[in-house]
Image (cartoon, rainbow, N blue to C red):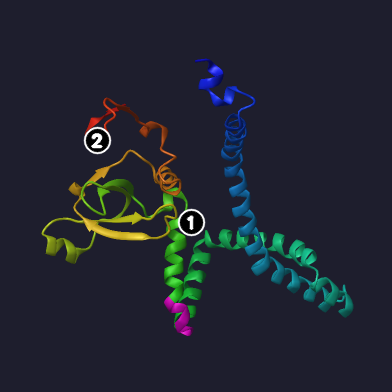
């Protein structure tokens, strides 16, 4: 039997070969372009959100200030306020500057004290804010803080949701006094995030002996979760060899 009969893609007249000849490069192109396209898509959505909700209102405020000081008249104000590009171009740089200045102010002792007083005033003055703000603050502190400021202490693996299945978890604290007393042993708290969106999950209290410490950083663990286990850290990669392909899991041997 010749190569043309055994390999459909080697025969130019074979429809199946033409299909594979188109499909394989197309899939390769998707694999190469999709990460960039998804990144651009997410950035565009985030940019639109900030511009529409913060940049444009700030830009419109700038136009009202310009009218108030007499640099533009009422007709120009009406025309420019309705122009999306004008308000966005005026407001977005100022929004970036405001965020930077607030962050810079917060790095000082006076800034942190003023911010705490403002938080207390908001929580006492508006009951609805009291129900939402603390949770939003905790979320941003955990997921948007720098690596050295994150509350996650280390990465572990644990048997969850049942024995024999292992999940990634982040040790968040040394546990709670009442739980330790009831269990008659020290129990740590571990946050087990969901995948591929690790912003939700479950908080579990268990003995440290029931966890497996992992030589993985918090950022590397997040990449594993977001990618669904595809982006394994290089130093954690393993290769598998199946001694006997019989469909049984005990026939597989792990090679480092």
Say whether residue 216 is magenta.
Answer: no
Q: Residues within 10 Å of mark 2 (few under 14, many from 20)?
A: few
User: Which labelled disc corresponds to residue 144?
Assistant: 1
Give x and y (percent) for residue 250: 22, 34
Q: Outermost residue toward the top? A: 2
Q: Does 4 sit above or below residue 246?
A: above
Closer to the camera, 127 or 222? 222
Q: Residue at x 76, y 61 (%)?
A: 89
Picture quadrant where residue 240 is located:
top left
Distance in Å between CA atoms under marks 1 and 2: 43 Å
The span shown in magenta is 125-131
Relative side of 220 to 103, left or right: left
Q: Which residue is mark 2?
A: 248
Q: Residue at x 25, y 36 (%)?
A: 249
Picture quadrant where residue 161 is located:
bottom left
Residue 98 visible in image: no
Relative side of 107 to 208, left or right: right
Q: Does 180 sit above or below residue 34?
A: below
Give x and y (percent) for residue 117: 48, 74
User: Between disc 1 and disc 2, whose residue precedes?
Assistant: 1
Q: Does 25 sit above or below residue 92?
A: above
């Amino acid at each position: 039997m010749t190569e043309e009969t055994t390999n459909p893609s080697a025969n130019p007249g074979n429809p199946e070969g033409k299909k594979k000849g188109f499909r394989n490069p197309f899939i390769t192109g998707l694999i190469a372009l999709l990460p960039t396209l998804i990144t651009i898509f997410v950035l565009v959505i985030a940019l639109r959100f900030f511009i529409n909700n913060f940049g444009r209102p700030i830009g419109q405020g700038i136009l009202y200030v310009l009218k108030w000081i007499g640099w533009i008249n009422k007709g120009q104000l009406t025309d420019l306020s309705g122009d999306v590009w004008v308000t966005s171009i005026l407001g977005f740089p100022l929004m970036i500057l405001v965020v930077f200045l607030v962050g810079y102010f917060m790095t000082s002792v006076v800034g942190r004290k003023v911010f705490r007083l403002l938080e207390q005033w908001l929580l006492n003055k508006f009951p609805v804010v009291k129900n939402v703000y603390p949770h939003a603050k905790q979320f941003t502190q955990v997921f948007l803080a720098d690596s050295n400021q994150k509350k996650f202490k280390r990465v572990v693996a644990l048997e969850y949701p049942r024995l024999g299945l292992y999940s990634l978890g982040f040790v968040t604290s040394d546990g709670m006094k009442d739980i330790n007393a009831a269990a008659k042993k020290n129990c740590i708290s571990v946050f087990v995030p969901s995948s591929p969106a690790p912003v939700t999950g479950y908080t579990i209290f268990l003995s440290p002996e029931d966890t497996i410490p992992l030589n993985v950083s918090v950022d590397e663990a997040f990449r594993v979760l977001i990618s669904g286990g595809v982006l394994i850290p290089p130093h954690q990669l393993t290769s598998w060899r199946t001694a006997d392909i019989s469909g049984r899991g005990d026939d597989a041997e792990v090679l480092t």
